[in-house]
Image (cartoon, rainbow, N blue to C red):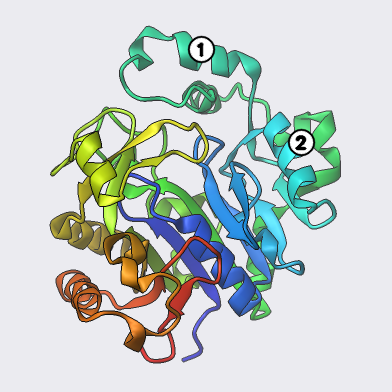
Amino acid sequence: MNRLPCTVIVGAFWGDEGKGKIISYLALKDKLDFCVRTGSVNAAHTVWMDGKKYALHMVPAAFLHEKCRLLIAAGANVHVARFLEEVQLTKVEGRVGIDQNASIIEEKHSVQDKTSAHLKGLGTTGWGVGPALEERVRRTAKLAKDIPELQPYLADSVTEINEGIDQGKKVLLEGTQGFLLSLFHGTYPYVTGRDTGAAAICSEAGVGPTRVDDVMIVYKSFITRVGTGPMPGELTKEEAQRRGWFETAAGTCRDRRSAPFDFELAKKTAKINGATQAALTKLDCLFPKCQSARKFDDLPREAKQFVKEVENQTGVPIVLIGTGPEALDIIDRRKQR
């Protein structure tokens, strides 16, 4: 049976897993034809190339491959000003499109996000995503096709993507945030305003589940979380700094809380998302001798053992291992696995 050339990328924990790095690597290595971003502006995907950092809230992380068609899904939630700013930053005008049915975040939504009493204490980013989604559910939201500034970028992304799959093109569906922030499956009420799992990513993009080849779940070698809500094994900020695990969020610059890798959570999220492959990022933060390694055999023994333990516990092969910040700091084991 021929395998379909469509892959879904989903975050395993509470976000910050390094999805932007994995997507940018796949774009360059596999020469992706299409990359479709789902979700909204409240998650930034970080891409490093030649020492330059891009924190992208709207433009798909696959922009590094100059022939990749970049699309924002019908189920996505678009911040117009941020989108236009990133188009200029990444120089992708002419190959980026927004589905005509994507909904719009307005300034009033940001105000509501920052001032609504029921959202206080939930760790919202303040971009206005939750209130904008509420309006969409009420059927009163503005859509991309209603916005004059977006007219040059309007697309029928659902048709483009599915025709691309029919033609054997390489398609990647870019999920945002982490699975444990899912409105349905996360640590409610400390969650985002939508489902963040692989099935929801497909739904937002307009791709049926039987048209997907692989679901790649992205783990980080330790866990981080921005904002409030439970987090098993949480370390103090001082301990996270001592271990070299302390981070700030790429989009909001808020401190990330840290905890050691949780095998039970990793197993659970792999199962619910139907993961067929996994990526493991920031191995060099756990084992500094891994920095910039490109071959599995070059890893120290304890790092190899950790990778194998994640595979054994989750039952999912780890095919990509991140060993540094640059897009190409990857050990690619797909041919061997």
Q: Amino acid at mark 1?
A: Gln
Dot 1: element = helix
Query: Which label lies toward us, 1 or 2?
Result: 1
What residue is shown at x 48% (from left), y 70% (from top)?
212
Q: Which residue is mark 2?
A: 145
Count the marks: how many? 2
Q: Mark 1 sits on what residue?
A: 112
Please tell me which of labels 1 and 2 falls first in the chain.
Answer: 1
Residue 73 appears anywhere in the view: no
Image coords of residue 274 (percent x, y): 31, 66
Measured Cα–Cα span from mark 1 to mark 2: 24 Å
For the residue pair 259 and 111, the one nearer the viewer reads as 259
Q: Position of residue 298 (x, y in %)?
A: 35, 85
User: Is residue 71 shown above or below 106?
Assistant: below
Drawn side of residue 278 relative to residue 310, left or right? right
In the visual, does 162 lie left or right of 185? right
Q: Residue 328: x and y, percent?
A: 55, 71
- Element marked by disc 2: helix
Observer-nearest of 260 and 115 = 260
The residue positioned 18% from the left and 40% from the top of the image is 235
| Looking at the image, residue 286 lies above or below residue 138 | below
Q: Which quarter of the figure has residue 241?
A: top left
Examine the image and state in which quarter residue 225 appears: top left
With 19 as the anchor, is 106 left or right in this view?
A: right
